[in-house]
Amino acid sequence: MSEINGASASGSFQDRHAAWHHEVERGRANAYGPLSATSMFWLTREPRTLPGLPGVWRADADGLVTVDFPVGSGVTSDGKPADGRFTAGPLTGTEGITLGWGDKRIEVAARSGGIIVRTRDPESPDRAGYAGTETFAPDGAWVVEARFVPRERAEVVIASAAGADRLQRYPSPGVAEFEVGGVPVALTLFGTADGGDLRAVFADATGEDLTYPAARFVDVEPLGGDRLRIDFTRAVNPPAAYSAAATCPFPPPENRLPVRIEAGELRPGIARP
């Protein structure tokens, strides 16, 4: 690990970390953020009603969504009533739309090779009862410089919170190699090497006691050439840590590290050690 700006946790580093985490928490507790999800359903080719929602729903094999909403359903699309037959798509990849429904929103999106319908409610129990998430004490020693090793893979197949039979597929540009306590480790990366969207989905040995064991997410910053920076103090929990109505990806097997990354967000409900 490499230490940034001298002291392992200078006041300015701590202040920047606190400001960053405040924004993470604000987004998480947003009226329609991850804590607002109250239900999730997978559409089928056969028309069917969905508990608690108006309309008769179906999606064909290509991702074309068709809903028959009764007159006066209250559902809107772009602010206009969606009464009668409503269609969307075909939705592929991770494409989606959002419908209004009074104070609630209905998210319709392609996920894991299928189509989900997810309700978001500002009055959800998860949001109302949220007590916040703590982090490890921010320590600049966990801002790691890594070596980028190009290893393009058109498709990395990984499990997800969507269910045991709902695999997800992402391209990978390569891996980040670095050391933790003298132990060489590597993370398969997702996104593009120079597109500003590089990240890792990982888990580590702190999942045994302190962090969310299924996954954490961390952004990866290209520094030029084969150098990368990974600020593990900004590793965050996925939506699945807070809601059963989540479809987020889990790490590929090689990203389950045997070392302890004692940085970033803790498991919900765990106090800072």
Image (tube, grey):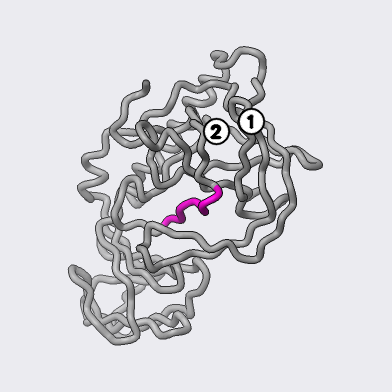
Height in image: 4 above or below 91? above
Q: Residue at x 38, y 68 (%)?
A: 165
**Magenta span dominant secondary structure:** loop
Give neighbour class at mark 2: few <14, some 14-19, many 20+ (Cα, 10 Å).
many
Residue 245 magenta: no
102 horizontally vs 113: left or right: left
Give whichever of discs 1 and 2 has the lower sequence position.
1
Q: Position of residue 28 (x, y in %)?
A: 38, 43
Q: Residue at x 26, y 44 (%)?
A: 127
Question: Which quadrant, please, contains the N terminus?
Answer: top right
Query: Which residues make up the magenta segment?
Result: 248-254
Q: Position of residue 86 (x, y in %)?
A: 36, 82
257 horizontally vs 125: left or right: right
108 horizontally vs 141: left or right: left
Tag 1–tag 2 contact (CB < 8 Å): yes
Q: Residue tagged by mark 2? A: 232
Q: Residue at x 36, y 69 (%)?
A: 116
Q: Residue furthest right?
A: 225
Question: Which quadrant, please, contains the C terminus?
Answer: top left
Q: Position of residue 204 (x, y in %)?
A: 47, 38
Which three-letter amino acid code belongs to the residue tagged 1?
Val
79 vs 136, nearest the viewer: 136
Height in image: 64 above or below 105? below
Give neighbour class at mark 1: few <14, some 14-19, many 20+ (Cα, 10 Å).
many
Q: Residue at x 55, y 16 (%)?
A: 9
Quick check: can you spot residue 86?
no
176 horizontally vs 241: left or right: right
Q: Position of residue 245 (x, y in %)?
A: 31, 58
Quick check: can you spot residue 71?
yes
Height in image: 8 above or below 234? above
Q: Residue tagged by mark 1? A: 144
Q: CA distance from mark 1 to mark 2?
A: 7 Å
